[in-house]
Image: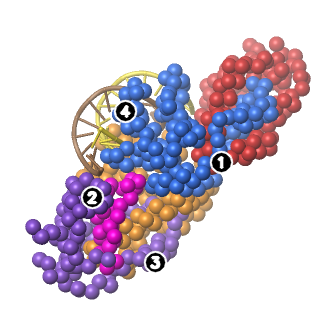
Chain colours: A red, B blue, C purple, D orange, E brown, F yellow
Amino acid sequence: MVSINKNSSKPYYEQLMLSIKEDILQGILQPGDRLPSVRELASQLMMNPNTISKTYKLLEGEQVLITVKGKGTYVKALTDVQRDEYKVGKLKARFNDLVIEAGHLLVTKAEIIDWITESEINLGGLENENSSIE
Amino acid sequence: MVSINKNSSKPYYEQLMLSIKEDILQGILQPGDRLPSVRELASQLMMNPNTISKTYKLLEGEQVLITVKGKGTYVKALTDVQRDEYKVGKLKARFNDLVIEAGHLLVTKAEIIDWITESEINLGGLENENSSIE
Amino acid sequence: MVSINKNSSKPYYEQLMLSIKEDILQGILQPGDRLPSVRELASQLMMNPNTISKTYKLLEGEQVLITVKGKGTYVKALTDVQRDEYKVGKLKARFNDLVIEAGHLLVTKAEIIDWITESEINLGGLENENSSIE
Amino acid sequence: MVSINKNSSKPYYEQLMLSIKEDILQGILQPGDRLPSVRELASQLMMNPNTISKTYKLLEGEQVLITVKGKGTYVKALTDVQRDEYKVGKLKARFNDLVIEAGHLLVTKAEIIDWITESEINLGGLENENSSIE
DNA sequence: GTGGTCTAGACCACT
DNA sequence: GTGGTCTAGACCACA
């Protein structure tokens, strides 16, 4: 399901990270699922394996994935993670920045809230389907 | 009112742009107001004048400021600009990306909507000050 | 009739030049008419006399005005001037540049031609109302 | 195809912008095409890379190009941008100013319309190449 | 290799 | 005094 747009101005590794995170939130990737190997995904997406590797490493750092040496990379259960208030603060600041941008594009708060409400991303509805990994 | 954080990974000029846009939305900067001169702000913030100049120039490109050679840089009225649906679409996508990030930090949609609602940014409340800056 | 917009990003002297040229084409200023003195116009428009002086000098250089020492500055008859093909070439190039800009704003040639046709500027309809100046 | 005239009073970056825009309208540069790298073009034109970079950046701001870090700069499809009436208004004013200039060079409207009609720039003939560059 | 950011400093145009 | 253009060169991020 993971895919990237080679014509986007967003870096490949960022697109990949978001794409994987999105698949997890949408349930396409379930906790415990094994991701394709670095080489496999690299050849699938016609990308440099270094880029895939970087992506997996970063997602490990964010507690989204977990790599077991010699076995592969797996999706971690979201509930295993405890909320990192520092990062939440950063996120809030980024939302605030976007709201500023919105103001100068004549977009109202109501509209933004609509976008978020209608978004296909499903937050808070994630049951603990505890993974057997780790 | 404008300030920047030299330890942020965000480029100075982006921080400045946001800071100025925020001040405008909050009414701290009113249409027609003159911004500090490039050299003045540069010495205030201990930065190179080129960086300030770049910021002003970019905001001019976004129809936020207007610059008059030999005189200075001024805040433009927001209201005579019309909504750019292309940019709005981009903005929406950025909101969507942030919502995905939020999901992995265990932040719910309700919480995000709260952040936006409570934000001090005032959208849609920009009256036409009719300053006719061109 | 001459006026300038202090909030425009165009330099004052350019605005003035255009404004005077426009008044001449529209017949508001007739060949032989005396323009206000530099000081007079400067105080009228609340501008630096140097700027007015510069404007008059430049318009003299373009054969639009003529200054008689001790008497004042007068509008020259357009027909006294012979067409300067070098400048016409430059002008054509500037039109071409604008057409390029137009293309990237999704403006068609038909639309541009409409603008020009409908413009209040009246070209070619200037009879020789020979001035007695010079 | 891009070239600049170092003796013109027009800034290099403006000349470059126009030259690139012209090439796009004439189909010499097609949507999706890669432009020379900043350093490459800089050495070709014997200019500082910063100046090229500025040009590309500005054209990106105008939705003409798109730039992907580490890869290069590409021509964007014109068609998915929507017309910006604010800028169109400004353009119209610039045409009007040129018509005034024309009057004082004894150029008639008919002549101007001829120039525009005969111009090699092809407006409105841009088919959607559907290159989906974002 | 690609582009992006920032500094430093020169020179020009406009008020 | 104001901003604008250009060069030169350092350092960083992405593929």
Distance CA(mark 1)–CA(mark 4): 32 Å
Which image quadrant is residue A14 in? top right
Same chain check for tags 4 and 2: no
> Which residue in the structure is indicated by mark 2?
C43
Same chain check for tags 3 and 2: yes
| Badge 3 amino acid | Glu
> Which residue in the structure is indicated by mark 1?
B124
**Residues at discs 1 and 4 in contact (Cβ within 8 Å):** no
| Badge 1 amino acid | Gly
Residue A66 in picture, x, y percent from top left: 76, 18
Label 4: few (<14), some (14–19) or many (≥20) C-alpha neighbours in 10 Å: few
Q: Secondary structure at mark 1?
A: loop
Distance CA(mark 2)–CA(mark 1): 41 Å
Instruction: Identify the residue at image location x=41%, y=77%.
Output: C120
| On screen, residue A29 above or below D127 | above
Same chain check for tags 1 and 3: no
Label 1: few (<14), some (14–19) or many (≥20) C-alpha neighbours in 10 Å: some
> Which residue in the structure is indicated by mark 3?
C118
> Which residue in the structure is indicated by mark 4?
B40
Instruction: Identify the residue at image location x=68%, y=28%.
Output: A91
Label 3: few (<14), some (14–19) or many (≥20) C-alpha neighbours in 10 Å: few
Q: Which mark is residue D88?
A: none
Quadrant position of the N terminus of chain A in the picture = top right
Please state the chain letter of the residue tagged with numbered disc 1 in the rendered image: B
Q: Secondary structure at mark 4?
A: helix
**Residues at discs 2 and 1 in contact (Cβ within 8 Å):** no
**Residues at discs 4 and 3 in contact (Cβ within 8 Å):** no
**Residue C14 covered by magenta stretch:** yes
Q: Is residue B33 left or right of residue C81?
A: right
